[in-house]
Image (tube, rainbow, N blue to C red):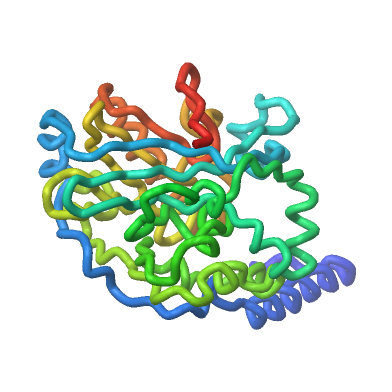
Amino acid sequence: MRPILSRRTGRVALCAAVLASVLSACATPASHHPTLPSDLGVASTASALEPSLAKPGLVTFRRIRFATWTGGRGSFIDRDDPRTAAVPAGTEEATIYAYVIDHPTRGRYLIDAGVSAGLEPQLNWVMRRGLAEMNVRIAQTTAAWLTGQVQPRGVFLTHLHFDHIGGLIDLEPGVMIHGGPGDAAERSWTNTLVGHPADVILRGHGPLREWAFRADPDGRFAGVLDIFGDGSVWALHVPGHSPGSTAYLVNAIDGPRLVVGDAVSTRLGWDDAMPQPVPAAARADAETSAERLRRFAADHPAVEVFLGHQSRAGQAEAEIR
Ligand SMILES: [Zn+2]
C-alpha cells in the first residue's frame, strides 16, 4: 500500500517533481563541438598491455604544473556517503597539471592542456563567480609554457572538464584533440547553467576525436587502446567521473607512469579509497574504475601513479618549465 501523503509532504513532493522535470528539460550536452571517432589507437587488452611494462621505454614523460586552487573537501569526496564521515571538514589544495610525452617518431603529445588567460573573460557570470571562489593561482599559462617549446601535434584528454582542457585555447587550431567517448554528449542542466565552457575552449579547433574503446575481454578496464600500436602509450577507459574518463599508461624511458585524471583526483581518493561526489547514476562506475586503477597499480608496483589534482606522498612536485 502506498503511504498517504500529508498536504505539506504532498506539496513538497509535487514541487520536487516539477523541479526535476524543469531541470531535465533544461539539460543540454556538455559540448556542441563536433566529434568523430579517433583514427589513433588499436583496440587491445590489459593482458597485452602488461608485458609492455617490462620492456625498455620508448618515450620521455614530464609533468608540468600550471595552477593551484583551494576547494572545500566536499567537492572532492562524497559527503553523503557514510564512509567519508570520519574525514574532518576542511579544504584541499588542488593543482592543474598537464603531461608532456615525446615520442621518437610520432612527435610531441600532451595529456590534458594546462590553463589559458583567455578563458575567464569568455565565461558566463556563473562560471566566473565559481572561479573567483576557487581562488585560482596561475603559476604559468599554456601560452607562456609553449614559448620556445616544441609544439605538440596532439592532446590526449583525461576528460572534458574545463580545468583539464582550458589551455587548448592557447594551442594552434591544427593540434588534434583526442578524448573519451560520450564526454561531449553528456547531458545535464548544470551545462546550461554554466554556459558550456567546453564549447568556448574548443572553438576554432577541429573535431574532438573520441577514443574507439571496445570492451576489454579481460574485464580489467572498460576498454584498452594501444595508442600508437607500439606499446609506448595506452589509453584506459575508466568511466564514472565522466562517461569518457580516460587514464593513460605511458611506458617512459625512466619507467612506466599511470596518469589517472579525475578518476581519482586526490590522496583521499587513492590512499583512503574515499568515494567522489558524482551523480547517483555514475556512482557504481566511478567506484569500479577507481578500484580497477588501484588494483592495477598494486599488481605493478613499478608503475608511478599521477592523480588528477594532487601529488602522491613522497612524489616530486611537477616542474613549472
Ligand atoms: Zn573533472
71 to the left or right of 312: right
Q: Residue furthest front?
A: 148
Q: Position of residue 192 (x, y in %)?
A: 67, 75
**Quadrant hosting residue 199:** bottom right
Q: Residue at x 17, y 34 (%)?
A: 57
Q: Residue furthest top?
A: 314
Up/down of 297 relative to 174, above or below: above
Q: Residue at x 17, y 38 (%)?
A: 58
Q: Residue furthest right?
A: 8
Up/down of 199 relative to 245, above or below: below
Q: State the residue in front, 178 or 47.
A: 178
- The quadrant of the rendering that contains the N terminus is bottom right
Up/down of 16 relative to 93, above or below: below
Residue 44 in view: yes
Tally of numbered tags = 0
167 to the left or right of 148: right
Residue 80 in view: no
230 to the left or right of 202: left
Q: Position of residue 42 (x, y in %)?
A: 15, 59
Q: Residue at x 28, y 73 (%)?
A: 37
Q: Position of residue 95 (x, y in %)?
A: 59, 38
**Quadrant hosting residue 207:** bottom left
Q: State the residue in front, 8 or 274.
A: 274
Q: Position of residue 6 (x, y in %)?
A: 85, 67
Q: Residue at x 23, y 40 (%)?
A: 59
